[in-house]
Structures are given as structure tokens and as C-alpha cells.
Image: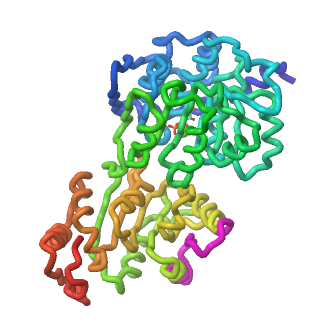
């Protein structure tokens, strides 16, 4: 058997490179803005890292930093706050772990480090919030690598797992805590964790945390009276998109921050092809079948995440009916809506995520608060009434490096959306159908109906633009 050290190294670092596909990411553009932004680095040698950190980076086989790491590492080492918009797979985890842990090593042994730190209540020096158990665990695994042979002990806590086992882990000492927001609030309330010494705070995948409805918990944590105030702690926020709600959080939580835009920011990324087609209510089902048949989904044994199709409908009844219709025709489909129990929704989501049923029919309300994976194709079987919700939905596709498609069925009932939709499509450099442009113009004039191929005629809806 291997000596204990070597066993542990093997367990932590593995034998092969987990490897990032550098050719794919190397030329991702990064833009940094803010007050006196430190220069980016091109190699891990360009910054003064502690010996422990250098050797752990080498053991992890990180030969050179990814674009987001090149910028974030010197900025975070310079003790600045950061708002970074970067998509998945860009190496964000090390971008915050390396400089935060290194600062802890440089600060040297502090009162609550080391073996005398054991006890009922833990005072972590750093806190990382992440939306899901999976993500929290991934960050924790990475933290263990970079904390190897240091005095810093990382811990992870998340919901859906016995809290008492997590208490026991915490009691052995916790300097860097990775947590999902709900479970952390629970830990704070029970007096197992206190934030008085928290000098580094990271919100990872902040947009996803908000999607999942965690804003109240996040605010409770960050604004708790024991947490050092904005400016007294270092705060880093990472998010794939930068909608209004995230901007507000950044205003509230960050101090004189550096803004990093890694790759293309925003949900109307050029990676998403947005199509709007005029489809009457009665024709929607056959149009949908055409789309499903055109995807190569059904030839696949087990579609990967990037093959999944997400179909949005407006009502619970609509979701039930569409699922039944597709199911009867033999399509692998499941659905989530407000009449399903949380358990049923999670089961449906699991079947979707694993590709068992690669078509998911969802109402927007039910989809909110669930960790829906990123998909290949979003279909707005029914369009929402406001454009923000539209942006939100199509943001489920076209993540970093992956091309996504969003197809929306538009008819008279959606007139109210026409103007905003046109504006959005133009901004995202998408093709705008002529009929949509004129529908938007009709709306502005406040009258007139568009009748092309329309069974009902626009007049019935009083030209109800905007
Ligand atoms: P993100 O959080 O941006 O989605 P991760 O931090 O999870 O990305 O990194 C994605 C993968 O790339 C992980 O397996 C990680 O270990 C690996 N990785 C990150 N940075 C580097 C690097 N500099 N060199 C080699 N592999 C890296
Ligand atoms: Mg990540």
C-alpha cells in the first residue's frame, strides 16, 4: 500500500489531467473595467504565490491560467471586489479559490485556525455560496486540492442531506465554507456557523441562485449583522448573465469593484439563434412535431445535456395536455407545472437532465425555483407576455461554446410583445421577420389588424398593441 501522503495525493489530484480544452477557451476575450485595475497575468509565475499554493497548482496540473484566471487572480490578490460575467467551463472556481486561499496562507495562522479551532460553532474566514449540491461539491473538491498541506480546512454543507453529519464535519474545523444558501441559513439559525470572521465572500453562479429563488436567503446571509459589511470584506460575484436583479445585488454587496466581462455577456448572446414564427393556436401542435422530428434527438440513445429540448407553455392544463399528446405519439416527454408536488417536479427534472426524457414541457412559474439544465433548444409554444420572461427562458440555451436555438410561436395573442421582441432581436443581430416588424409598428399606431393567414383576424383583439 502507498504511504498515507501519496494515497491522499492520489485521492485529491487523481492521475490524469481533468483538463480544460484550452484551444476552445484560450481566445475568449476578457474586458476589465473599473478604477485602477491591476494588470492581467499570463502565467501563474507572474504573481507571488505561496509555496504551498504553487505546489498545489502544479499537482492539479494547471499549467497555465485560463482567461478568467489571468484577470481575476491579480485583482483578487490586490484585495479588490469583483463582478465577473463568465460562462460555465471557463475556470471560474480556481479564479477565486487560488487568490482567496493564498491570502489566507499569507495572513498566516490566525486565532481560529489549527486544531484549537474545533468546536460547536465555526467562524469561517471565507464563504462560497453556490446554487446546488453538485456545484457546491465541485467547488469543495477543488478547494481541497488547493488547500492541501495547508492549515486551511475546507468544508461543504448543502440541503437534502442529514444536517447532523454536516455538523460533525464542521466541528472538526472550518476555514473555508462552501454552502448552498438554504442550508447555510439553517446552520446560522442553529448557531453552528457565525460569520464574524468572514473576510472573503463569493457568490458563484449568482444568476442561477436567483433563478432558484434564493435571493431572500442570500440577503439574510450577506446582510446578517455578524457578517463584515460591504467594503470590510472582500466580495466576488460570478454570473453567466447580468440581468437587472444581479446588477442590484452587485450594487448592494460590492465595493469599488472591478467588472470582468469574459466572452460575450448577456443572455441575448450570438450563440443563440432566435426564431419567431407565426403559428396559429390550432397549428401549434403540428409545428412542434415538425421541430421535434427535425432535431436528431430521437435517433439518440441517451441525449446529452446539449441535446435537450425545453418547451414552455402558459398554463398547467396546457402542460398536461401537451405532455399527454406527445406521450401518446411515442415521444420521450415529461412535464413540470404547479399542480405537481415538489417531489414529482424533481423526478421529472432528473429524467430530463439525464436524457431519459429529453423533452420537458414546463410552465414558467413551475420552472422558476428549479435547477433546469442548459438545453439545446428552447421552444416557446406559448410566448410570455413580457420580454424579461422571454429573455430568461432563452437564456436556458446557448451557453459558452454551445450553439443554442430558441423558437417562438407567435400569433395574435402575442401582439403586446411585438415591439419589445423586435428591439431585442435587432440588438442580438437576429433576423427579424417582416411581419413581426409590421406587427410591432401596428402596435405603435394603436390599431389595425394583421390578417395574413390568420383565421381569426387581428381585429378581434382590437389591435391590442402595447
Ligand atoms: P466554471 O466554474 O467556469 O464552469 P471550472 O472552474 O469548473 O469552470 O473549470 C472547468 C474545468 O477546467 C475543471 O475540471 C477544472 O479543474 C479545469 N481547469 C480550470 N482551470 C484550469 C487550468 N488553468 N488548467 C487546467 N485545467 C483547468
Ligand atoms: Mg463553476
Taking depth in this image into account, of 4 and 79 the one nearest to the observer is 79
Q: Where does the image place residue 303, in percent across and percent down from the top left?
A: 54, 59
Q: Where does the image place residue 199, in percent across and percent down from the top left?
A: 59, 25
Residue 317 appears in the figure: yes
Taking depth in this image into account, of 227 and 19 the one nearest to the observer is 227
Question: Could you tell me which residue is drawn at 56 percent across and 55 percent down?
Answer: 371
Image height of 385 relative to 317, above or below: above
The magenta span reads: 322-344
Question: Could you tell me which residue is drawn at 23 percent across and 85 percent down?
Answer: 454
Q: Quadrant of the N terminus?
A: top right
Question: Could you tell me which residue is drawn at 42 percent across and 60 percent down?
Answer: 393
Residue 400 appears in the figure: no
Residue 12: name its quadrant.
top right
Ligand 2: image quarter: top right
The mark tally for this picture is: 0
Indicate yes or no whether the magenta region holds residue 336: yes
Taking depth in this image into account, of 398 and 289 the one nearest to the observer is 398
Outermost residue, front side: 225
Relative side of 2 to 301, left or right:
right
Image height of 242 relative to 272, above or below: above
Image height of 71 relative to 337, above or below: above
Relative side of 228 to 164, left or right:
left
Taking depth in this image into account, of 70 and 1 the one nearest to the observer is 70
Q: Quadrant of the C terminus?
A: bottom left
Q: Where does the image place residue 120, in percent across and percent down from the top left?
A: 82, 33
Residue 414: name its quadrant.
bottom left
Relative side of 2 to 411, left or right:
right
Question: Could you tell me which residue is drawn at 53 percent across and 49 percent down?
Answer: 215
Outermost residue, right side: 1
Amino acid at each position: 500500500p502507498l504511504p498515507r501522503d501519496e494515497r491522499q495525493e492520489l485521492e485529491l489530484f487523481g492521475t490524469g489531467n481533468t483538463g480544460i480544452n484550452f484551444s476552445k477557451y484560450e481566445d475568449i476575450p476578457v474586458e476589465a473595467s473599473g478604477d485602477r485595475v491591476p494588470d492581467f497575468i499570463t502565467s501563474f509565475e507572474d504573481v507571488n504565490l505561496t509555496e504551498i499554493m504553487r505546489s498545489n497548482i502544479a499537482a492539479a496540473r494547471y499549467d497555465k491560467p485560463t482567461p478568467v484566471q489571468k484577470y481575476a487572480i491579480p485583482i483578487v490578490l490586490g484585495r479588490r471586489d469583483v463582478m465577473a460575467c463568465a460562462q460555465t467551463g471557463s475556470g471560474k472556481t480556481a479564479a477565486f479559490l487560488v487568490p482567496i486561499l493564498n491570502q489566507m496562507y499569507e495572513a498566516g495562522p490566525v486565532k481560529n485556525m489549527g486544531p484549537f479551532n474545533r468546536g460547536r460553532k465555526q467562524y469561517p474566514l471565507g464563504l462560497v455560496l453556490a446554487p446546488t449540491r453538485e456545484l457546491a461539491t465541485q467547488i469543495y473538491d477543488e478547494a481541497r486540492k488547493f488547500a492541501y498541506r495547508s492549515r486551511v480546512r475546507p468544508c461543504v454543507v448543502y440541503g437534502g442531506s442529514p444536517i447532523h453529519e454536516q455538523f460533525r464535519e464542521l466541528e472538526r474545523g472550518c476555514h473555508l465554507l462552501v454552502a448552498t444558501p438554504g442550508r447555510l441559513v439553517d446552520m446560522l439559525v442553529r448557531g453552528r456557523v457565525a460569520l464574524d470572521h468572514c473576510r472573503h465572500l463569493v457568490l458563484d453562479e449568482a444568476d442561477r441562485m436567483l433563478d432558484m429563488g434564493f435571493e431572500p436567503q442570500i440577503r439574510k446571509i450577506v446582510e446578517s449583522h455578524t457578517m463584515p459589511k460591504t467594503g470590510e470584506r472582500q466580495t466576488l460575484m460570478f454570473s453567466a448573465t447580468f440581468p437587472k436583479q444581479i446588477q442590484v445585488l452587485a450594487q448592494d454587496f460590492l465595493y469599488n469593484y472591478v467588472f470582468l466581462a469574459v466572452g460575450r455577456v448577456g443572455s441575448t448572446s450570438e450563440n443563440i439563434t432566435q426564431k419567431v414564427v407565426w403559428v396559429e393556436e390550432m397549428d401549434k401542435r403540428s409545428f412542434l412535431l415538425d421541430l421535434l422530428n427535425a432535431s436528431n434527438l430521437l435517433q439518440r440513445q441517451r441525449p446529452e445535456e446539449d441535446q435537450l429540448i425545453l418547451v414552455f407553455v402558459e398554463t398547467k392544463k396546457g402542460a398536461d395536455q401537451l405532455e399527454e399528446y406527445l406521450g401518446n405519439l411515442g415521444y420521450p416527454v415529461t412535464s413540470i407545472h404547479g399542480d405537481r408536488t415538489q417531489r414529482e417536479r424533481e423526478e421529472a427534472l432528473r429524467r430530463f437532465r439525464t436524457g431519459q426524457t429529453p423533452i420537458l414541457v414546463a410552465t414558467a412559474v413551475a420552472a422558476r425555483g428549479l435547477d433546469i439544465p442548459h438545453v439545446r433548444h428552447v421552444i416557446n409554444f406559448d410566448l410570455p407576455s413580457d420580454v424579461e420572461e422571454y429573455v430568461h427562458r432563452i437564456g436556458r440555451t446557448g451557453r459558452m461554446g454551445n450553439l443554442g436555438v430558441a423558437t417562438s410561436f407567435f400569433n395574435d395573442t402575442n401582439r403586446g410583445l411585438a415591439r419589445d421582441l423586435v428591439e431585442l432581436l435587432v440588438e442580438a443581430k437576429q433576423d427579424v421577420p417582416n411581419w413581426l416588424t409590421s406587427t410591432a409598428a401596428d402596435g405603435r399606431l394603436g390599431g389595425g389588424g394583421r390578417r395574413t393567414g390568420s383565421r381569426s383576424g387581428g381585429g378581434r383583439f382590437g389591435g391590442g398593441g402595447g
